[in-house]
Amino acid sequence: MTALTLSTAGAATLRADALVVGVAKSGKELIVAPGAEAVDKAFDGRLAAVLETLGASGAEGEATKLPAPAGLKAPVVLAVGLGGAPEDGEAFGTETLRRAAGTAARALFGTKKAAFALPVADAAAVSAVGEGALLGAYAFTAYQEVGKDAKRPLAEVALLGAKPRDKAHKAAAERAQAVAEEINRARDLINTPPNDLTPAAFAAAVQTAGKEHGLKVQVLDEKALAKGGYGGILGVGAGSENPPRLVRVAYTHPKAEKTLALVGKGITYDSGGISLKPAGHNETMKCDMSGAAAVFSTVVAAARLGLEANVTGWLALAENMPSGSATRPGDVLRMYSGKTVEVLNTDAEGRLVLADALTRASEENPDAIVDVATLTGAMMLALGSRTFGIMANDDEFRSTVHEVAEEVGEASWPMPLPADLRKGMDSPTADIANMGERMGGGLVAGLFLQEFVGEGITWAHLDIAGPAYHEGAPYGYTPKGGTGSSVRTLVRLAERAAEGEL
């Protein structure tokens, strides 16, 4: 686990294995960003010129290493690009700083200690640089044989320019540490192979964390689910030897005035069931529990931050497998709400487990419910692989979630819930079918979920199918594999609830 500290030492005097500075483009010139003045001085004011000679342009995502000159305690200087320099008097954006810090941390894999001399004009910048560095330093090595000589992620991040005695700066660093570690918790869960992360194993992990952080955890096993009438969760898990679970994990605060309920899709492996996925679409389906991982990590983060809000997570956990006992296309399931659903496609399983969890969460009458799911390939077709869609039964709340996502640097986009698409889910056999029109499939899924939200409860649905799992090369603070998408947005929503703004 990477440590984060605020250092009062100067860039020239701190002993570290590497010193990180920022560079940016100003017109056709390369400039050194604020925070690196002492480093530039050690280069006799020619750091930008030296970097240009080495081919640096200051573009975002660029990292250039060079040996440090006499006068610096660190042997290596790493210059990371910040993109275009802001207008006079303006600061670099927090997401720009977050990505640059992540790029630097990845480039320094195998390094013990790095000093970050990036621009930290205020507490928001401190938080962004800290988050980016800790997220960029992530690596999933649990299943790799790691010898004593193997390289490990950056072990310590020292932020220069921040003020350890400043309450705002100290709080920003502590928040960055907690949020980044919980995002990395979600990443670990997403990256864990499905033979080890079964619904029962996931539930056990929640129970362990619950004891550590003072959370109330309730686990409904297959017997309790059957007794309670959770036909959606049971129907999805019917084909697997690993039975489903519904987990309630709750953080409460004695001064809380608002309650936020979070519901996460937790399909620990999705084969598609009887409607089997085609070749080439199964290999990454361990990530289909990313929504549940995000919800779980958010509840733990709320506890670590001591937020004055009640945050309850509902994790709908199941493994979707084909077998003689699996739900078939054409079967009808009676959901926890009492509604019946005709299953036309067993690969549209996420909405079935979420429906039961949404109904159960609604019974506690929270101020708002947000569900998170890797729900539809249609959302990826609409928004690509880096942006999640937001649907809601309240336009103002949908705008709030979008605003919050932008604030914390997560790409999102508001999506509609067109009433005309609801008719496509009419069933001659049951109250509703789990499939509708093919066009607008992501919106159809949102309309299905809306049917199971309690009357009068504000609700939003985040379809994180695109950004939850990154299959390409790492960039910024985003690794290959599980990303922890939506955790930052959910944590900020919980903070807003604590501030009475939900």
Image: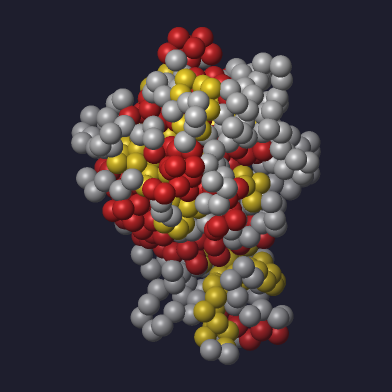
Q: For this rendering, which residue is in front, 381 or 126? A: 381
The residue at 74%/48% (across/down) is 151
Q: From the top left corner, tell me how far across and down residue 475 is, in percent.
A: 63, 60
Q: Tell me how many marks there are.
A: 0
Q: Is residue 233 above or below residue 23?
A: above
Q: For this rendering, which residue is in front, 220 or 227? A: 227
**Side of 120 relative to 77 (left or right):** left
Which quadrant holds residue 289?
top right
Colour mapping? secondary structure
State whether residue 140 appears in this view. yes
Which quadrant holds residue 49?
bottom right
The N terminus lies in quadrant: top right
Q: For this rendering, which residue is in front, 451 or 20? A: 451
**Side of 127 relative to 199 (left or right):** left
The residue at 50%/76% (across/down) is 33
Q: Residue furthest bottom?
A: 28
Which quadrant holds residue 164?
bottom left
The residue at 50%/25% (across/down) is 429
The residue at 31%/32% (across/down) is 454
**Side of 364 relative to 80 (left or right):** left
Q: Residue furthest front?
A: 428
Q: From the top left corner, tell me how far across and down residue 35 is, in percent.
A: 47, 72
Q: Is residue 425 above or below residue 204?
A: below
Q: From the top left corner, tell me how far across and down residue 359 is, in percent.
A: 38, 27
State whether residue 262 appears in this view. no
